[in-house]
Amino acid sequence: MRPRELTEREEGVLRLIAQGYSNKEIGGQLNISVKTVESHRSNLMEKLELKSRTDIVRYAVLQGWLQDT
């Protein structure tokens, strides 16, 4: 089953989670509430069938998002 496409905001939240930022830090960077960050995280995890922050990091690594450029 192919995962549903993430919104631009969900992808941004995913990238920041994978980089180790807390929900509060992500909210501050994106000028959104912690509750909104949690909502985006929940939605993206459901779409990608991920179960934990570790799965999010693993996904980001497989996408090549955490490599230094």
Image (tube, helix red, strand yellow):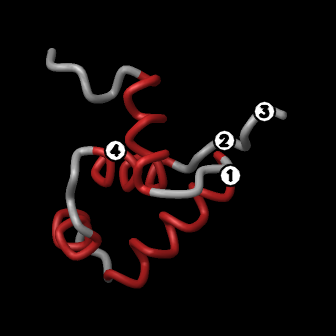
Q: Residue at x 48, y 35 (%)?
A: 59
Residue 56 at x, y = what percent? 45, 46
Nearest the eye: 20 or 47: 20
The three-letter code of the residue at mark 2 reads Glu
Residue 2 shows which numbered tag?
A: 3
Residues at marks 3 and 4, CA–CA distance in whole angstroms: 20 Å
* Numbered disc in front, either 2 or 3: 3
Label 4 vs 1, first from the N-terminus:
4
Q: Which residue is mark 1?
A: 47
Q: Earlier in the sequence, mark 3 or mark 4?
A: 3
Circles 3, 1 touching at the beta carbon (< 8 Å): no
For residue 5, the mark is: 2
Are discs 2 and 1 less than 8 Å apart at CB? Answer: yes
Q: Is residue 25 left or right of residue 38?
A: left
Q: Position of residue 20 (x, y in %)?
A: 22, 52
Near mark 1 (Cα within 10 A), the count class, few <14, some 14-19 or many ≥20, is some
Identify whether 32 is placed above or below 15.
Answer: below
Measured in 3D between alpha carbons, the distance from the residue under mark 4 to the one under mark 2, in whole angstroms, is 15 Å
Mark 3 is on which residue type?
Arg
Q: Which mark is residue 15?
A: 4
At a point 41% along the width and 48% down the height, the residue shown is 54
Residue at (34, 44) in percent of width and height: 15
Mark 2 residue crowding within 10 angstroms, few (<14) / some (14–19) / many (20+): few
